Image (cartoon, rainbow, N blue to C red):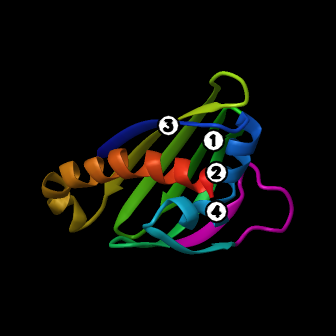
Amino acid sequence: MIRAAWWTRIDRPREEVFDYIADLENEPKWNPDASNVVRTSAPGPVGLGTTWEEDFARVGHYITTIDTYERPSVLSFDAKNPRTDAHVRFDFAADGDDATGVSCVVELTMKGGMRLLEPLLASRIRKQIEQDRPASLSHAFDA
């Protein structure tokens, strides 16, 4: 398993940051690897069990489900793919007046032939996630 963790501060209230991240249709705005995000669950509020299909650069097509939804403090996604499964957990903490500290843990489980490449890819994947995602998410709120 490849595990990456990062943290950032966003000058917006927790509820706003939580809701933005919970709606995966926003993900391509802050995650350059995500594209073609389409909600597949019934219309209505985003919450526990909401599902999407999305494409990820270099990895392929995922079916992604919210598996923890404790607004505004904890949110996690379970993403399934034939090559790599991902579990992504976000924790949101008040950080001063109307600011939010966002921490994220990404756990990737390689499958099939990808398992053989994991030792070669782990460091590069971890570094990319930990260095790029915090700034990308912060910039999305600046726009």
Could you tell me residue 131's position as x and y percent?
A: 34, 47
In the image, residue 105 above or below residue 19: above
Q: What element carries label 2?
A: helix
Specify whether 32 is left or right of 3: right
- Give residue 40's mark: none
User: What residue is disc 4 on?
Assistant: 26
Question: Could you tell me how far apart the alpha carbons at marks 4 and 2 are, in whole angstroms?
Answer: 7 Å
Mark closer to the observer (3, 1): 3
- Give residue 75's mark: 1
Residue at the outermost bottom position: 36
Mark 3 or 2, nearer chain start: 3
Q: Can residue 71 be seen in this view?
A: no
Magenta range is 40-54
Determine contact: label 3, label 4, CB under 8 Å.
Answer: no
Could you tell me residue 64's position as x and y percent?
A: 57, 61
Circle 1 packing at 10 Å, graded few (<14), some (14-19), many (20+), is many
Question: Could you tell me how far apart the alpha carbons at marks 1 and 4 are, in whole angstroms?
Answer: 15 Å
Mark closer to the observer (1, 2): 2
Circle 3 packing at 10 Å, graded few (<14), some (14-19), many (20+), is some
Question: Could you tell me how far apart the alpha carbons at marks 1 and 2 are, in whole angstroms?
Answer: 9 Å
**How many marks can you see?**
4
Determine contact: label 1, label 2, CB under 8 Å.
Answer: yes
